[in-house]
Image (cartoon, helix red, strand yellow):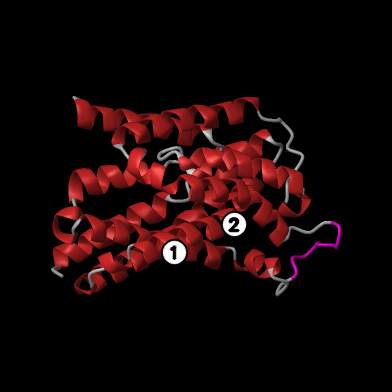
Amino acid sequence: MELLDLIKAVILGLVEGMTEFAPVSSTGHLIIVDDMWLKTMNFLGSESANTFKIVIQLGSILAVVVVMWKRMLSLVGLYKIPGQTSSRKFNLGHVIVGIIPAGVLGVLFEDFIDENLFTTETVIVGLVIGAIWMIVADKFGPRRPKITSLDDLSYGTAFKVGIIQCLSLWPGFSRSGATISGGVVLGLDHRTASDFTFIMAVPIMAGASGLSLFKNWDAINFDHLSFYVVGFVSAFVFALLAIKFFLRLISRVKLVPFAIYRLVLAAVLIVVIYL
């Protein structure tokens, strides 16, 4: 691997880490940065490049685990969150009922989505419709959220958020954009909706990435191992910074600024590709 190639790995890790958990669509950003500019497929090969994108996604997942380690340990009974009681406790059951809808649909339609929906056109549609959904959530969601802590979350509400998360199966819609907005509409404050979104993302993304990695194991070229490692570390570091920053920011700025950014991104894609 040449130094320029490793710099590309750092850039792609940065893009993945900074955008995976913000409601702006990491898929849209990777299309702009990689497919239109860096073009890693040209020297990695298409299968190896797709495997690399799975690897850097795993780096982002690890960042969530590190940032939210107390909640993660509490889910398996290894840590007690202050203020928790037997009747007021966010637990693994909430996560399971939250990930079931998207998990089931993702397994059933994985091949269809991969073969038919990962196009620039569908990503643009996802960016625009997702932005509208976020604006609707901010403008028409409850003015006084009823749920201000994960420990106030019911199984029913967790399941409803999980159903809304299915929107993110459309590339460009954004998992965070779908679920944070859905949580806000259902009465969660922005920070609690974000916390639940990030925690749910760990098993969903880990499972999807692990399955894809297993299926594409033969495509891994170990001559590119340094490229994978640099990208993984870069995604982890930048996701770590982005998550901490986003969780402090979301309660103040809400969702509309991110929605406007998505609309601008969609416009840039249209201009670059079609004009």
Q: Which residue is mark 2?
A: 199
**Mark 1 or mark 2, whichever is nearer to me:** 1
- Which secondary structure class fits the magenta region best? loop
Can residue 173 be seen here? The reply is yes
> What residue did someone put label 1 on?
210
State whether residue 189 appears in this view. no
Is 10 placed above or below 175 here?
A: below
- For image coordinates 47% across by 36% down, the residue present is 258
Q: Between residues 74 and 216, which one lies in front from this camera angle?
A: 216
The span shown in magenta is: 80-87
Give the side of residue 268 with respect to residue 257, left or right: left
Where disc 1 sits, the SS reads helix
Which of 117 and 257 lies nearest the eye of the viewer? Answer: 117
Identified at 77% across, 39% down, the residue is 146
Q: Residues within 10 Å of mark 1 (few under 14, many from 20)?
A: some
Which residue does the image show at 17% across and 63% down from the upper left?
Answer: 5
Q: Residue at x 66, y 30 (%)?
A: 141
- Amino acid beneath label 1: Gly
The quarter in which the N terminus is drawn is: bottom left
Q: Which mark is residue 69?
A: none
Q: What's under tag 2, amino acid-wise?
A: Ile
- Image height check: is 9 above or below 265? below
Please state if 52 lies on the left or on the right of 111 as rendered.
Answer: left
Closer to the chain start, of discs 1 and 2, is 2
Q: Position of residue 256 (x, y in %)?
A: 51, 31
**Horizontal and vertical percent position of residue 215:** 37, 62
Quadrant of the rendered image containing residue 180: top right
Is residue 151 covered in magenta?
A: no
Q: Position of residue 102 (x, y in %)?
A: 56, 46
Q: What is the count of numbered marks?
A: 2
Instruction: Label 2, secondary structure: give it.
Output: helix
